[in-house]
Image (spheres, rainbow, N blue to C red):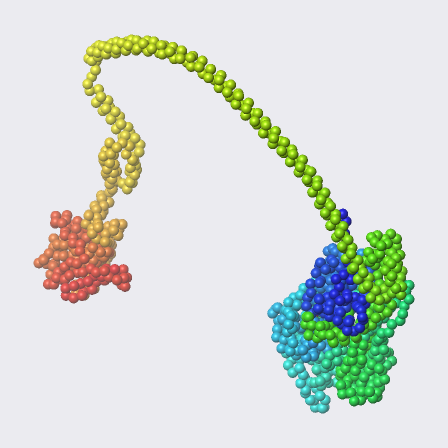
């Protein structure tokens, strides 16, 4: 089923009237009230015919969502409530479907919402036109050109925080399908004076603040900038930060937008370098310097800034410095150089900054155009969007305001022309008679400004070109002469006496009555700004820059292309470009958006009636409505008109078969509308008075209510009837079902009763038969039981007899077996022996032992005495044998081992054994001696000639010859002595000379004492009263104590057959001459190394410290 389309109209749910043409009565008050009422209900758009009035809401409204775009898409202009989207849609469809180039003209004061409106139009068109990757890129580039241009061309003013300081006209180009191909942007007169100076409460262009707030430290360093705004003379400080504007975030947006639009990274960087250079130019300051010839000269105060600018731009510092101090004038072949005074130098600096910036801006526009230009040469359809600066009245109005307001005059002019023309054309098209209407035509003001012979701009140019001294005052004088009689020109000094006493008009000003109000212009600066003079030296210096962008901005600086002709003045340039624009606009189908500013506070919800009234007046909106209504207030094509009102007449309701026009005729006749109230055009009905329309609307409403009641009545009747029929049908169904159910139940009851009776009878019968059967069965059972008892008795008797028989047979067999056994034993006893078991046992045991030894033979461990291996024991009862065997084996292999020794080795081992018996576990020194072989004669006396005498003196065999330390009895110090042991004697000799010092026969040695510790001290005790004992006992220390003591012991034993007493104790007494001295071993500290030290403490004590 096709979806029912709901026809809506502008006239539905209107707040006030959506189209001012319908206002009744029409006057200023009702007009404003209507706007206010709508504004209070968030309806910021209102129509005057096809013109859209937009009141700035100063807050975001939820009326631009994608859903809204869908609502307005492909709908007729009057179908929905007024909206900027309706106008955009109308323009776009007219472009796409009827091949008409469009222009959208947005006018209004500064801050009225023009720029926002232009963006809304663009975004709407972008949303509804073709889709696809390529198209989307074009769209994105077109939309992203806005943030770039706004950063460089917009600034905060007292009227608007984001005021466009340039005029912008953008042509969007489409192909035949309505897909966007690209665009062209034209810019008009950037307000460049803002670069060097800003009025109170205003800012410089956004980009400066964005750069300083948003750039990374790295970028700032590269551009030689500091983040602090106050460092730059060109940035006004009083409103550097604006509420609701995030400069840093915007900087990122702009960089991003530049990328999308297609700026290369190096291009974007160059642009920022130029911006930085402009900022830094403002910091160059000059001081006066007088020269001898009396000419004034200026000098740069601090050259640092200049140096940095030159580094940034790649200009030779001396070239730029010279350009700031000299001016060269060339005429024909002559070249004259004059010095600049301080004021001129400042002028030159500012001129350079302004030119640099404005040329950069134009370059940006061209660069963007390059990116967004259509790539094909096919014929294009064009939609132009004009967002030009609004009419401006400031406290101080200068050349810029003059130019801006002139531009607005021209736009008003074109508005008047086009709306009236359009209206007239429609009447002609529709074949309707046209009546003239009065309105204010501002052509006269345009003429005052632009007239080629005596217009203000022409005067200004004339002044600028005139030889001789030219000042702003001479210009004003000229104006006073030429324009005095003009109705819209006012000046105190003009010959016209009207203003001689007007104190509101200062002498240095002139006033123009613009269509939008009177504006007082300060004449100061007009000449300079119109001349827009940049000294040639500066442009040449700029051309010499190695920075390619800057170089390209100053082509006139190229000495090869020197042009002595004056460039066109700013005024004439602007006039020419405005004229081209107007021509361009006239070829297109115009769509108007007239922006109105509801208050001066940039605040939401405030509707200042007097302010709005003023704008309505100068925008000529009332006249606009009047013109629109002069003939007929309302017009509508026949089809929608018939569709809307057909219910008012029986013939046309519900369907009219025939052409719509005759239907409308019939309808209007039937309604008896006076004939002069309407007129039939070719395709539209024209209604003269809104009253008639409202009457129609009222009737329609009434009729709609009646129709609604009718529909309601019929519907209710239908609903009741259908309900009743349904109930009736249901009742029959229910009754049928119930009857069936009841019958079913009755039948079931009868059936079950029959079954019960039947079952009772059957039961009774069955029981009777059962009784009989049971009786028969019992009789049979009784007979069987009796038979069984009888058989049982017989069987038991038989069993008893058989058992008796079997027992007897068994007894016979047993007795027979015993008898047989007895007989056999008696016969065989003589064959058995008594000791057979013992023999078997012994035999077995022998076998086991034999096996054990045979196995052991194979498992024998090695012959090494230190081998601890021994096979495990195989039988527990052989445990002691096994252990014994192990011991015997070990002893045997030890013997084997010893048998290998020579006699000498045997001796050594004997000595070692002896030493072990004497000292093991008694003296701590012992373990370290085990590894040392006992050599005895360490000192080879035979071989050393030094000891020849000593050798000769001894005849016996030398057992020990070794150097020992003899401890001095008196002080504990030691001296080296040769210690000699022979078979019978112990000798001490001088180490150097070999002379014998003492000789002790071994029989006189009674005892040897030593400590239990790890030291080599030992005392040799002598027999009391012997000859050798006269000096007392000896105390030695030796590295081979164990060996010496052992050998002394063995020798003494073999010679004297007495065991030498060896005392091991940490404290023992020695006899020194007459005294008994105690030798005491103590634990010493490590301080003296690992050598034990010996010290005589007193008469009775000698202390040895062992580490
Ligand atoms: N349709 C709108 N919805 C919300 N705010 C708006 C709208 N139009 C304008 N504004 C607000 O008004 C301010 C000024 O508008 P703008 O278009 O820059 O003025 P103009 O270009 O006419 O000087 C904007 O910054 C915005 O805050
Ligand atoms: Mg703007």
Residue 1035, quarter of the rendered image: bottom left
Is residue 877 shown above or below 953?
A: above
Q: In percent of the image, x 32 and y 9: which residue is there?
A: 797
Which residue lies at the image location 50% right of the left edge and 19% below the top edge? 766
Q: Nearer the viewer, residue 692 or 64?
A: 692
Q: Residue 814, position in %: x, y?
A: 25, 11
Quarter of the image that includes the C terminus: bottom left
Do we see residue 612 in this rendering?
yes
Left or right, 688 with respect to 946, comes to right
Report x, y in % for residue 926: 23, 52
Camera-side residue of 106 and 625 = 625
Residue situated in front as seen by the camera: 176 or 410:
410
Ligand 1 lies in quarter: bottom right
Q: Position of residue 40 (x, y in %)?
A: 71, 68
Tell me: 915 left or right of 643.
Answer: left
Q: Residue at position x 80%, y 73% from top?
A: 27
Q: Is residue 971 left or right of residue 659?
A: left
Q: Residue at x 78, y 71 (%)?
A: 31
């Amino acid at each position: 089923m096709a979806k029912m389309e709901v026809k809506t109209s502008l006239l539905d749910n209107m707040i006030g009237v959506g189209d001012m043409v319908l206002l009744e009565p029409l006057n200023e008050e009702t007009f404003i009230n209507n706007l206010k009422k709508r504004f209070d209900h968030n309806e910021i758009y209102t129509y005057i015919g096809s013109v859209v009035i937009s009141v700035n809401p100063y807050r975001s409204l939820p009326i631009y969502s994608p859903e809204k775009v869908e609502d307005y898409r492909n709908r007729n202009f009057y179908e929905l409530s007024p909206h900027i989207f309706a106008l955009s849609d109308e323009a776009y469809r007219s472009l796409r479907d009827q091949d008409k180039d469009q222009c959208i003209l947005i006018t209004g004061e500064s801050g009225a919402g023009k720029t926002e409106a232009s963006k809304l139009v663009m975004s709407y068109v972008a949303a509804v036109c073709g889709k696809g990757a390529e198209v989307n890129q074009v769209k994105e580039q077109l939309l992203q050109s806005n943030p770039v241009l706004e950063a460089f061309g917009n600034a905060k003013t007292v009227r608007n925080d984001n005021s466009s300081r340039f005029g912008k006209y953008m042509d969007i180009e489409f192909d035949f399908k309505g897909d966007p191909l690209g665009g062209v942007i034209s810019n008009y007169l950037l307000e460049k004076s803002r670069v060097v100076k800003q009025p109170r409460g205003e800012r410089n262009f956004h980009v400066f603040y964005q750069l300083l707030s948003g750039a990374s430290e790295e970028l700032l360093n590269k551009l030689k900038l500091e983040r602090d705004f106050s460092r730059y003379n060109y940035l006004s400080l009083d409103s550097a930060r604006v509420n609701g504007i995030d400069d840093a975030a915007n900087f990122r947006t702009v960089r991003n937008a530049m990328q999308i639009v297609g700026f290369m990274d190096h291009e974007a960087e160059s642009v920022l370098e130029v911006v930085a250079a402009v900022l830094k130019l403002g910091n160059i300051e000059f001081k006066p310097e007088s020269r001898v010839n009396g000419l004034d000269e200026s000098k740069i105060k601090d050259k640092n800034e200049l140096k940095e600018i030159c580094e940034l731009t790649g200009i030779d510092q001396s070239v730029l410095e010279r350009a700031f101090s000299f001016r060269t004038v060339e005429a024909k072949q002559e070249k004259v150089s004059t010095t600049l005074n301080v004021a001129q130098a400042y002028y030159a600096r500012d001129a350079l900054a302004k030119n640099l910036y404005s040329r950069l801006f134009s370059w940006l526009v061209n660069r963007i155009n390059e990116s967004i230009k259509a790539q094909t040469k096919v014929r294009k359809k064009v939609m132009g969007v004009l967002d030009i600066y609004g009419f401006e009245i400031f406290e101080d109005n200068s050349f810029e305001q003059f130019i801006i307001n002139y531009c607005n005059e021209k736009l008003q002019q074109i508005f008047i022309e086009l709306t009236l023309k359009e209206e007239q054309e429609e009447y002609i098209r529709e074949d309707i008679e046209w009546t003239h209407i009065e309105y204010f035509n501002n052509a006269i003001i345009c003429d005052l400004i632009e007239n080629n012979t005596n217009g203000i701009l022409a005067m200004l140019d004339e002044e600028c070109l005139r030889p001789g001294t030219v000042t702003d005052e001479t210009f004003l004088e000229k104006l006073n002469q030429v324009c005095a009689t003009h109705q819209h020109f006012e000046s105190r000094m003009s010959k016209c006496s009207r203003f001689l006493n007007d104190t509101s008009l200062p002498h240095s000003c002139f006033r123009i009555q613009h269509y939008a109000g009177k504006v007082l212009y300060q004449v100061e600066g007009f000449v300079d700004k119109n001349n827009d003079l940049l000294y040639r030296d500066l442009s040449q210096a700029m051309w010499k820059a190695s920075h390619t962008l800057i170089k390209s901005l100053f082509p006139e600086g190229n000495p090869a292309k020197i042009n002595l002709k004056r460039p066109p003045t700013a005024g004439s340039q602007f006039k020419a470009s405005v004229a081209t624009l107007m021509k361009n606009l006239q070829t297109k189908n115009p769509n108007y958006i007239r922006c109105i500013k509801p208050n001066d506070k940039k605040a939401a919800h405030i509707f200042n009636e007097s302010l709005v009234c003023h704008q309505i007046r100068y925008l000529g909106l009332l006249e606009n409505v009047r013109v629109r209504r002069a003939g007929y207030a309302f017009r509508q094509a026949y089809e929608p008109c018939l569709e809307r009102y057909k219910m008012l007449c029986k013939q046309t309701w519900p369907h009219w078969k025939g052409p719509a026009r005759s239907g409308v005729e019939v309808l209007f006749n039937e309604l008896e509308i006076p004939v002069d109230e309407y007129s039939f055009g070719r395709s539209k009905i024209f209604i003269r008075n809104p009253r008639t329309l409202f009457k129609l609307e009222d009737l329609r409403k009434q009729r709609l209510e009646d129709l609604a009641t009718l529909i309601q009545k019929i519907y209710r009747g239908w609903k009741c009837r259908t309900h009743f029929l349904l109930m009736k049908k249901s009742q029959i169904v229910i009754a049928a079902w119930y009857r069936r159910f009841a019958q079913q139940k009755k039948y079931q009851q009868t059936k079950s009763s029959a079954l019960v009776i039947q079952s009772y009878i059957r039961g009774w019968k069955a029981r009777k038969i059962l009784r009989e059967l049971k009786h028969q069965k019992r009789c049979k059972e009784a007979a069987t039981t009796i038979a069984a008892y009888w058989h049982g008795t017989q069987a038991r008797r038989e069993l008893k007899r058989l058992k008796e028989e079997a027992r007897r047979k068994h007894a016979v067999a047993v007795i027979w077996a015993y008898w047989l056994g007895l007989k056999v034993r008696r016969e065989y006893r003589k064959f058995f022996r008594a000791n057979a078991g013992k023999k078997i046992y012994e035999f077995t045991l022998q076998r086991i032992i034999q096996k054990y030894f045979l196995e052991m033979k194979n498992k024998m461990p090695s012959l090494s005495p230190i081998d601890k291996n021994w096979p495990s024991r195989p039988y527990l009862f052989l445990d002691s044998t096994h252990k014994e065997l192990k011991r015997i084996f070990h002893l045997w292999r030890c013997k084997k081992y010893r048998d290998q020794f020579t006699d000498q080795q045997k001796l050594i081992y004997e000595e070692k054994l002896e030493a072990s018996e004497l000292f093991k576990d008694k003296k701590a020194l012992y373990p370290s001696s085990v590894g040392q072989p006992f050599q005895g004669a360490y000192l080879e006396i035979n071989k050393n000639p030094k000891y020849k005498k000593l050798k000769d003196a001894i005849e016996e065999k030398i057992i020990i010859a070794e150097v020992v330390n003899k401890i001095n009895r008196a002080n504990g110090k030691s001296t080296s002595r040769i210690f000699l042991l022979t078979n019978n004697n112990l000798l001490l000799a001088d180490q150097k000379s070999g002379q014998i010092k003492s000789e002790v026969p071994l029989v006189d040695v009674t005892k040897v004492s030593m400590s239990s510790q790890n030291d080599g001290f030992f005392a040799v005790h002598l027999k009391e009263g012997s000859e050798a004992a006269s000096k007392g006992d000896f105390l030695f220390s030796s590295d081979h104590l164990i060996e010496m003591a052992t050998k002394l012991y063995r020798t003494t034993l073999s010679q004297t057959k007495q065991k030498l007493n060896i005392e091991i104790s940490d404290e023992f007494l020695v006899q020194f001459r007459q005294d008994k001295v105690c030798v005491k071993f103590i634990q010493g500290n490590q301080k003296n190394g690992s050598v034990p030290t010996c010290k005589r403490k007193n008469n009775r004590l000698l202390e040895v410290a062992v580490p």
